[in-house]
Amino acid sequence: MSDHIDTEKLDRLAEVAVRIGVNLKRGQDLIITAPVDALPLVRRIAVHAYKAGAGQVLPFFTDDAVTLARFEHGNDASFDRAPGWFFEGLGQAFKEGAARMAITGEDPMLLAAADPDKVARVSKATAIARKPAMDPIVGFEVNWNIVAYPTPGWAAQVYPDLPVEEAQGKLMDAIYAASRLDGDDPVANWKAHTARLKERVDWLNAQSFNALHYTGPGTDLHLGLADGHIWKGGASPALNGVVCQPNIPTEEVFTCPHAYKVEGTVAATKPLAYQGSVIEDIAVRFEAGRIVEATASKGQDVLRELLKTDDGASRIGEVALVPHSSPISQSGTLFYNTLFDENASCHIALGQCYADTIEGGSVLSPEELKQKGGNQSIIHVDWMMGSDAVDIDGITKTGDRVPVMRGGEWA
């Protein structure tokens, strides 16, 4: 671990991840996936998990060097393979009550020089194979959480002008601030923040909008909302009854768009880091819910391959509102990491919807979800399209317009 990473801050992040994030219950197993560079955080999480009464803490690691070895030396057939047996095992663990924690921190440019076709093939094979492990997460069947660790590769991308260890320390400080861990009682911080998000959620649910209309530079988008959509945000109960905070940090309130009722144009306001590549200046046009034109100044081939992953990859499954004044936005830092950048900006997600953002969605079949407008896909990729130059109106069922955001702020 870098000497520049504050160990007290790391320990507080671990404690909040266990107590507020996943909200681990006594006797519950905790499955952790993480980059191997994040081992210091995994170890602190294990300490706090066992203090909370964990049954067993089970970490699984990825390694950048091993990933690169595959793309540099792997035989061609290997790029269409993924360990289905591993994801089936994870899925079985979730069925038996295990909680899930993911630690993010991968180098966003790791695969920038790799063959885009191979990257797309690996991504698709992995997305298909991991479905047994993702379904319990997408369906919010278990308590889960994502937090971040400042790995050397990631820190070097965020702060390229600094020595790597110094960049890691600075990124740790940024993660700490964005994760609302300052002050004497970060647990109280999170309870107050959740209450503020709930106020927004309650107002939006009371409005019961039929659609949202976005206007801004490069954006004129009419986004229909799914039948029976439910706005959510902050901590909420999983189907196992455990109230957890899935994302640390989080600034969003979100719901399910109607996959077949999106029309118009939208321009991204931040780059998208995806599968080791960075896609910049995304601009797309929707017709009847599907993206029919897509361009990017960088990573366009990766974007277009992503949209061809399956039938639902070119439709959206989530829409989220985030004020431009969020702490992450105001930091001025581009993290090249969706967990952070999505919480600096309003965003949409290509692919799979969250069933629990449709009334009764947890017990609906995929076909029933589709009939209400919920999208189905093996991917779920968020990208940012909000700024201080974007206005949003809610459209009621009678066609009236209600200001939701003006200049990127709640109206």
Image: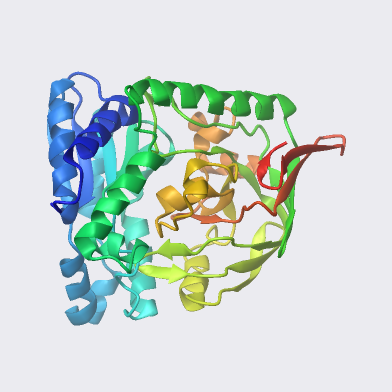
Image point (26%, 67%), residue name: 81
Quadrant (top left, top right, bottom left, bottom right) of the C terminus? top right
Q: How many marks?
A: 0
Left or right relative to 239: residue 267? right
Residue 299 place in picture, x, y as percent = 47, 75
Q: Nearer the viewer, residue 250 or 27?
A: 250
Residue 195 place in picture, x, y as percent = 51, 21
Left or right relative to 332: residue 407? right
Q: Nearer the viewer, residue 318 or 38?
A: 38
Residue 240 place in picture, x, y as percent = 35, 23
Image point (32%, 42%), residue name: 147
Q: Nearer the viewer, residue 183 or 401?
A: 183
State whether residue 150 appears in this view.
no
- Which colour scheme appears in the figure? rainbow
Image point (17%, 40%), residue name: 7
Q: Quadrant of residue 138?
A: top left
Residue 343 place in picture, x, y as percent = 49, 45
State whether residue 258 appears in this view.
yes
